[in-house]
Image (cartoon, grey):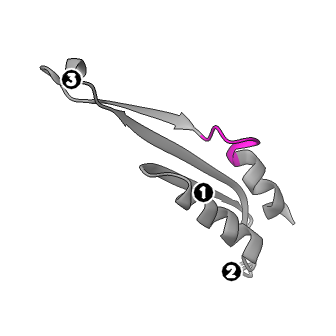
Amino acid sequence: MMAMTPVTSEVLARIAQAIRGIRFGSVQITIHDSRVVLIEKAEKIRVESPDLNQGGDALTSSSPDQSPGGARAASRGAHG
């Protein structure tokens, strides 16, 4: 069994920031050798319009993080 690597407060803060930054969606954390190496977030935006809702459901769009540096920048501090 491999020894567990502690998660730094910086990584925890970046995960919390990703969670707070979206209203609907998901946060995916990728781990290699017991270390967080990538934090990705996907936000779902529901678009509701009277024309779209007549005879069908509202559209749901999924897009990756659009903030400067994106989710990949959030994981840079996790390599250390």
Vertical order, 78 against 60 (above or below): below
> Front-most of 45 and 26?
45
Give residue 50's mark. Answer: 3
> Front-most of 58 and 28?
58
Q: Which residues are magenta?
A: 65-71
Q: Amino acid at mark 3?
A: Pro
The residue beneath circle 2 is 1
Q: Secondary structure at mark 2?
A: loop
Give residue 18's mark. Answer: 1
Q: Secondary structure at mark 3?
A: helix
Q: Position of residue 49 (x, y in %)?
A: 27, 25
Q: Quadrant of residue 60?
A: top left
- The residue most toward the right is 80
Q: Amino acid at mark 1?
A: Ala
Q: Label 2 near label 3: C-beta < 8 Å? A: no
Point out the frontmost of discs 3 and 1: 3
Q: Earlier in the sequence, mark 3 or mark 2?
A: 2
Q: Is residue 47 left or right of residue 35?
A: left
Q: Amino acid at mark 2?
A: Met
Residue drawn at point x = 12 percent, y = 20 percent? 55
